[in-house]
Structures are given as structure tokens and as C-alpha cells.
Amino acid sequence: MTSRAVTSGAPPGAPDRGPLVRFEGVTCGYGGKPVLKGVDLAIAQGALVG
């Protein structure tokens, strides 16, 4: 198993502009069948996801 880090962000002192990534009401699945419905997710700038 490998692991990768992705970094992104505004310069230090930049104003907060809210979440870096936001999903609202997402439905996903496979084989034409939904597995997750109505998922909301917001990831803040600088958050560690893993």
C-alpha cells in the first residue's frame, strides 16, 4: 500500500474564504445502485484527510 500527501493552500495571512472543498447532497454508487445518498462534506483549508 502506498500513501501520498497533497498540499494546497493560500499564502500565510490570506483571508479565510470558507471550505477548500464542499460537496452537498451527493449520491454515489456502482452498478446503477446508489450506495451513499445525500452526503454533505466540507474540507477546510489545511485539514488533514486520511
Image (tube, rainbow, N blue to C red):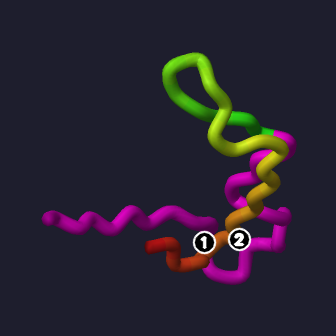
Answer above or below: position of 11 versus 32. below
Label 1: which residue? 11
Residue 31 is left or right of residue 32, and the answer is: left
| Magenta-colored span | 1-25
Residue 43: give x, y in percent of width and height: 69, 65
Using the rendered view, name the quadrant where residue 17 is placed. bottom right
Q: Nearer the viewer, residue 41 or 18?
A: 41
Q: Nearer the viewer, residue 43 or 15?
A: 43
Which residue is most to the left?
A: 1
Number of numbered discs present? 2
| Amino acid type at mark 1 | Pro
- Picture quarter with the N terminus: bottom left
Secondary structure at numbered mark 1: loop
Residue 25: give x, y in percent of width and height: 85, 41
Using the rendered view, name the quadrant where residue 4 is placed. bottom left
The tag earlier along the polypeptide, 2 or 1, is 1
The majority secondary structure of the magenta stretch comes to loop
Label 2: which residue? 44
Residue 37: give x, y in percent of width and height: 78, 41
Answer above or below: position of 15 versus 22. below
The residue depicted at 43 percent of the width and 66 percent of the height is 7
